[in-house]
Amino acid sequence: MSTFLDALNKNNKSHIPVWFMRQAGRYLPEYMAVKNKSNFREMSHTPQMMAEITLQPLRRYPLDAAIMFSDILTCLEYMGAPFEFRDTGPKLDDHGSHVLSALKPLNPQEHLNFVGEGIRLIKLNAKVPVIGFVGAPFTLISYLVEGGTSKEFIATKRLLFSEPKKFSSAMSFISEQLVCYLDYQVRSGVNAVQIFDSWVGVLSQEQYEIHILPHMTKLISDFKKRNPSIPVILYSQPTTHLLSCLAQTGADAISVDWRSPLSYISQQIPKTITIQGNLDPIATTLPWEQAKPHVESVLKSARSAEILDRYIFNVGHGVTPHTQPETIARIVDFVHTFKV
């Protein structure tokens, strides 16, 4: 058993496990060497390239988990909503609420077999647990309606407010497809899964309780019926105001942003749930001596909250292209040797 899986099972007795969202990414020279000869679609749709990129940070650092190299939108193109990655991020030229009613059922075995093969190649070479993932229904809907990322998610919220039945129907349909996709990832070899609800923080607590929680609870419950031993991590930001709701979804772990200390967050989440986070990713862009106080503050907060048996160190959002590889190395070493 690994410290990562031990922490997810609330019984870690060893060092604090650490991994980073977007740990395989543009801050690594070896990633850029691949990227400069290819494009994102080829990189994420070719099993050999997917595996190579996933394994790159593991060769540099003694990380406690690997997360497969892919994207939360990959499944959408096989549901009838293709997207492109541009310099400003993912874009869907055909977007709006009409796209939701035109979505098609997903057959992961047929449509996403390259992901399954990529996972199998990663498992052949990784000595740590492998994390699979999907985007949460709300976050995927926001991309489909907005056509990309947004600051205020006006179109998405207008849909939720004005056509709640249509919104709910889309949430249900997408949830069903995600359960199948996650199940396929597990059958391909992942040891844990993470659900990215990156933009749900734009909703109020009441809105989440009414429009999101029932769907998330069912999604996780349906997945757990098929895979009772596979831990589910739920990531979102900025969602400190939603912690009590997130804790009701059935997730085994809640991954939190950097905006509140772990000593506070732990009071809002039951002891039956693992906590993951919550370093501000900008700290990873600093030289180690400047980053160290931020890392130490997170770890001390985790220790004072008495959650070290159910705690995983991570960033509160993905590491950035400006992250310093040497700083990541020092963070991993510092976390692993932190006196618990």
Image: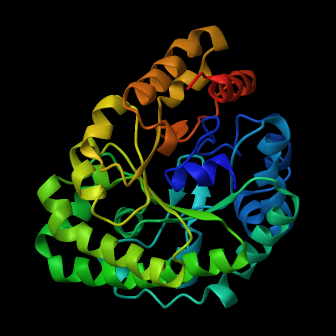
Residue at the extreme top of the image, as rendered: 289
Left or right, 144 with reference to 6: left
Residue 12 found in image quarter: top right
Name the quarter where the N terminus is drawn: bottom right
Q: Where is residue 311 in the image (x, y as percent from the top left)?
A: 49, 41
Name the quarter where the C terminus is drawn: top right
| Colour scheme in use | rainbow
Left or right, 100 with reference to 331: left
The residue at 40%/62% (across/down) is 251
Q: Can the viewer see residue 293 in this picture?
A: yes
Q: Using the image, determine if residue 278 lies above or below residue 141.
A: above
Q: Position of residue 78 (x, y in %)?
A: 58, 82
Q: Can the viewer see residue 259 in this picture?
A: no
The residue at 81%/51% (across/down) is 55
Residue 33 found in image quarter: top right
Left or right, 69 with reference to 35: left
Left or right, 161 with reference to 289: left
Count of residue discs:
0
Compare residues 303 and 193 and report the one nearer the observer.
Answer: 303
Q: Using the image, determine if residue 295 lies above or below residue 265.
A: above
Residue 288 found in image quarter: top right
Q: Position of residue 263 (x, y in %)?
A: 33, 30
Compare residues 334 and 112 and report the one nearer the observer.
Answer: 334
Compare residues 50 and 155 and report the one nearer the observer.
Answer: 50
The residue at 52%/18% (across/down) is 296
Q: Where is residue 295 in the image (x, y as percent from the top left)?
A: 53, 21
